[in-house]
Image (tube, coloured by chain):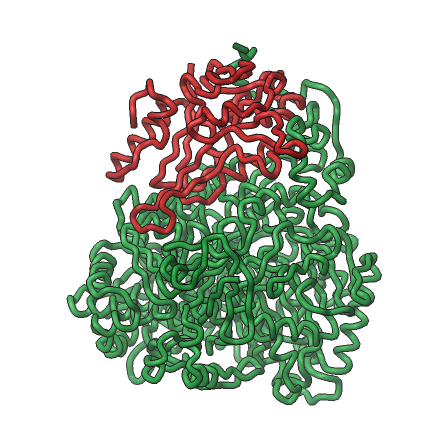
Chain colours: A red, B green
Amino acid sequence: MARMKFLCDAERCIECNACVTACKNENEVPWGINRRRVVTLNDGEMGKERSISMACMHCTDAPCAAVCPVDCFYTTADAVVLHSKELCIGCGYCFYACPFGAPQYPQLGNFGGRGKMDKCTFCAGGPEADNTPAEYARYGANRLAEGKLPLCAEMCSTKALLAGDGEIIAAIYKERVVTRGYGSGAWGWSTAYPDSQGV
Amino acid sequence: MLQKRRAGVSSKTGLAGVLAAAGSATVDRRAFLRKSGVAAGGLAALGAVPLATVRKAEAGPMQPGVPIEIKKNICTHCSVGCTVTAEVQNGVWVGQEPAWASPINRGTHCAKGASVREIAHGDRRLKYPMKLSGGEWQRLSWEQAIDEIGAKLEELREESGPDSVFWLGSAKFSNEGSYLFRKLAAMWGTNSVDHQARICHSTTVAGVANTWGYGAMTNSYNDIANSKAIMIIGGNPAEAHPVSLQHVLRGKELNQAPMIVCDPRFTRTAAHATHYVRLRPGTDIPLVWGMLWHIFENGLEDKEYIAQRVHGMDQIRAEVAKWHPAEVERVTGVPGAQVAEIARIMATQKPSTLIWCMGVTQHTVGTANVRALSILQLALGNIGIEGGGANIFRGHCNVQGATDLGLDVTSLPAYYGLSERAWRHWSRVWDLDYEWVRDRFGKAGMTVEDKQKLMEAKGIPTTRWFDAVLADPADVDQPDRLRGMVVFGHGGNTVPRMPEMRAGLEALDLLVVADPHPTTFAAVSERKDGTYLLPICTQFECNGSRTASNRSLQWGNQIVEPLFESKNDYEAMYLLSKRLGIEEQMFKHIQVDGTAPLAEDILREINRGTWSIGYTGQSPERLKQHMEHQGDFDMVSLRGKPGTPVEGEVYGLPWPCFGTPEIKHPGTHILYNTHEHVMNGGGTFRARFGVERDGETLLAEGSWSKGSEIEDGYPEFTYGILKTLGWDGDLTAEELATIQKIGGDDPDSVSWAIDLSGGIQRVSMAHGCVPYGNAKARAVAWNLPDPVPVHREPIYSPRPELVAEYQTYEDKRDFRVMNIGHTIQAQAVKEGTAGSYPIILTTGRLVEYEGGGEETRSNKWLAELQQSMFVEVNRADAARLGVKDGGMVWVYGPAEGKVRVKALVTNRVGEGVAFMPFHFSGYWEGESQRAKYPEGADPIVLGDSANACTTYGYDPVTAMHEGKATLCRIEAA
């Protein structure tokens, strides 16, 4: 069984934000909710600037799941971390636990009241039946069930963002690094996937 | 823990199959439009969507039980030409999938391309025709709108002649739309018909066409994968052409090619460079001559190539000798060692490619800049070579095609110019009497000679139209000043001097804006009456071809019907021409269904007339076949793979694709490539400047394209030359008859470019010869103001001490108005403007937005990513000025403009330089103009316009504005 992962090649990412709008487009994510975003480090500093596309990394032993008081998270057989909006109470604990800032909350009413958490699903929907309007309404698209990968990675302009089986994308990345002779590592992998061999 | 029931079980049948079996809830187009909120609220409504309804299920992208149709079109943003794969249910665009088969984008997109489906939601679109009456927007029917516009146009024509109306077209048109708009202007009777190329790459077209023949990118995006060194100057493709970076990074990674980025600003592209060169804005020529100084000094130029294929390089040497390293450093600010290093890389790691964009072109010396870069590539022998080339990245999705098809104040379609010969050629193509066409020009009662004079005079360009509105009629070289403007698909915040532009708008009797959005033109001025808005659909709602930067034509299929009451460009032009009583002539050989002209038929007419640039072989049938077989082309060579129906052809039949479609020319991947046979896309430098100059031959010496029966240089082909060579017998009887008919009593003079039979082209190519001849490229272009490019300081130079030595061009009357750049430069020096405005101001693009930005700022998925207009200020300058990151500042231009924007404190810009993106409008001097847009058609994000601050300055060859080097003063607000 595949172990799904994301990998962002910072030597390729140009902060074009295709991943961000592809996600909005595929999942009709509303204004104010960012399942994916591109972060630029050392912006404007020669030789140091790097951009990285970040979303839920679908961690091994996900910290969000560990802290969730209502146990709404579950990991699919593809190792995608999903959650149930039926169960979620919008407490925000997962936001504090997540090393990548992935969980998002719509503002509900005044006084900063939070709605149910929303995050990247690896384009794998949620607990409802696959590819039903009910599933789409809550979680967005379920491309995995159609045999497709997340649209953010599929549309990445420079193929910096890779999604798929961890071993395959790690092999692609390693081959690139060997060919070109440089690489700054798979950002976030040691945090998200401590059990996997580093690349 | 919850377990997913079917976790990991992938259904290979695809969503269509899964859903076809399920329920039956459907949504039709009408219901979709209703539900997606023709009258949707603004930002507040967007933010308040509750979580449980990430989307409204009834408007969902995938409706169970409804078949999905796949439609292919081309992205409507930049010139890369990414294929968009759309999923359509019941006429609603419900999903976008990666276009894996496209050899250009290979599934990928940038932020803009990945969000184009939002355009079909259309929340902020202009929904029906409107007019401004007493300062209020009123809804009209199409009939009434066209009738009132037509009546007013006729009135202006009567009183002031047809030249009193300015026709501003669009790089967003399809090729067919561009051609039709040029034809409409011709039949209205004016050459004042322009589009965005004026302000993006007009200087490139003029510069490279004057050097080697054609005004276009010589190679392709894909070919950059073959480069051993890549130099990008004045371009930020990571933001302006993101998908091109896929090809650039391929070259960089696979060949370990050095990537040199020369830019005043440390851009997102520069972040990936191996060598970043920071130069002062407006000093490109000194940098290039500085590189050539090292190349000549070390004998690294390609001597054999220069001897065979380049004219006048010795005169370049003389100029370059003045640019020794110390002077280069003094003028450009680039360290001498760095110039030496990049010169060595470009000269030794070959083939090396040179990429440039608007940092080079948008200057008073734009054409000269382009010429200097072209000469650098000629000196290195990089033109006509795989992996080399002048890879000019054009801007808009069809700016190349719109330029080719004559949306230009200096030419009819296909660069024929405006001479009598050109008009007679196009009159023959249109099957109209030349005299009838001529009679459309000038005022009633003018002599034939005066009419012909106007017919052959360059029109008023888009950078100067407001000067021609505000001028005394006696100062405009035509019967009257400009009084009306018809704008199709063009932003209003795109040229400098917006305060004057605004005054120009207010002085117009008639303003017609035909666009999917109201645009800045509709909202920026204090006009109260006489503005009409016509809702035009996007290219996604229309059939037609567009030409990518690499000259490939791609056919786009309509994805959905035009939204709301919008119509496509063709139909709007048909209705207008009908009201003006010229539809019979315009559409004489174009099928019109009801009021809708057939796109394929327009392309066939283009095919019948555009011999000079080889837009003749790209029939609609061939283009559609290429779209269908996208996956059959090689990703790097763009050639159709063996055993496929497109075997050997180049993807999109990049022009020149000579001859008729029947002779199956494969298109030209790389221009001037002598390593290929002309019938396989090979070529030579074009012989368009005569055969001799000052006793030296201008024809190639000892170089010819593969398989040529003439093994040396030769002039362009005419019937007379075919006879001299004894090849005239190869013409068929029909071809000969056509040639004789065109030639009248002088058939020998009929050239390859006006022979409507295509016979001369066919026969010359059968003998391995290129129809346009085999000449040398011109390092010296004696017809330009600077035959050898020389440095000239910007009008508003930050270095007044350099102006005396490197002053700008003399004042001159051209394009029907005065260009007083020299006077203004002298005045700025005298007044010490550089002292009171001590920061250099430059402008550029953001990845999320495009052009004037009205469309992209109306797209909620994009608008969310860039919510405020800003100015980049260097950290040291900010500290000195007391400017805080994120704080508001006033930016004052050295003329009258000022803007109030957010400060972005960053080292992206060097000390003493500020940068503003040019996509914003809808604020004027810090005040929101939102109320001036028709209700519901205001873009989500508004902001002050950079061009409110930018200033005077026009390239003498093309009237390109100075968009990249002016001055400003910044104060905390």
Residue B91, given in percent of the width and then of the height, sits at: 71, 37
Q: Quadrant of the N terminus of chain A?
A: top left
- Relative to B878, is A194 above or below? above
Left or right: residue A94 compared with residue B519: left
Residue A100, given in percent of the width and then of the height, sits at: 43, 30
Residue B315, given in percent of the width and then of the height, sits at: 27, 78
Q: Quadrant of residue B205?
A: bottom left
Instruction: Write the residue at 67% across / 60% down.
Output: B929
Comparing B257 with B875, the one in front is: B875
Res. B461 visible in picture: yes
Comparing B315 with B235, the one in front is: B235
Q: Quadrant of residue B342?
A: bottom left
- Relative to B272, is B789 above or below? below
Q: Quadrant of the C terminus of chain A?
A: top left
In the picture as drawn, the residue positioned furthest to the left comes out as B298
Instruction: Write the residue at 56% across / 46% down.
Output: B74
